[in-house]
Amino acid sequence: MIAAGDMRPGTVFEMDGELYRVLTHSQTHLGRGSATVRVKLRNLRSGATIERTFSPTDRFQDVRLESRKMEYIYNDGDFYYFMDLETYEQPGVPASLLGDQVKFLKEGMQLEIAFYEGEAIEIELPPTVDLEVTYTEPGFAGDTAQGATKPAELETGLTVNVPLFVNTGDIIRVDTRTGEYVTRVKSA
């Protein structure tokens, strides 16, 4: 059990039958009154974010997630399949759990998946991925005082804005947290 006053960002606990991760935590003391704890929570199954206020003595069941290193191997539309690098098991993860993260998945990519009682709960992508540009318009430097950009479609279907010097066939690095271009890794 964990008291609301002891929670910190990153803490995972169970409340009303659902798993939550603490995103932000602040504790306030009011004059002679009691203290309150305000937390911003993310539901690990649905992805919904909520804010709650608790008494510092409110207690919840803390949860330990098992994190395993996995390799993405393929998808069949409804499920994405990963291979455990130690046991070679191949669990299927529903596409709904991945959400927008599917646009960063590339066959052979290694990542961390957190499990709770055998159920995949959370996917942690690497901070950046290298993807090939499958299509972009040719860039022509013109009267630009600042760095101009153009849209580029990547091998996974993701579209990002890239500098004018990036061409079709180039490999670029994309930040998985923001979905933005970082650098060109290799030119075609």
Image (cartoon, grey):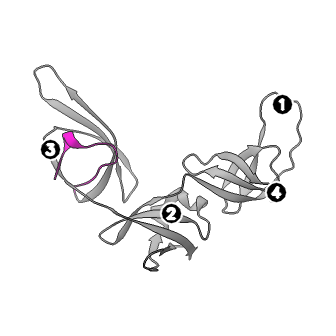
Q: Residue 79 colored magenta?
A: no
74 horizontally vs 186: left or right: left
Q: Which residue is mark 1?
A: 144
Contact between marks 3 and 4 (CB within 8 A): the answer is no
Q: Disc 2 marks which amino acid? A: Leu
Query: Height in image: 103 above or below 51?
Result: below
Residue in the picture at 26% in, 36% down: 38
**How far is disc 2 from disc 3 in space, using C-alphas?**
35 Å
Element assignment for label 3: loop
Query: Which residue occupies the extreme front position in the image?
Result: 86
Q: Which residue is mark 3?
A: 58
Residue in the picture at 48% in, 69% down: 70
Residue in the picture at 86% in, 45% down: 139
Query: Height in image: 97 above or below 176?
Result: below
Taking depth in this image into account, of 185 and 21 the one nearest to the observer is: 185
81 horizontally vs 175: left or right: left
Q: Which residue is mark 2?
A: 111
Q: Earlier in the sequence, mark 1 or mark 3?
A: 3
Q: Earlier in the sequence, mark 1 or mark 2?
A: 2
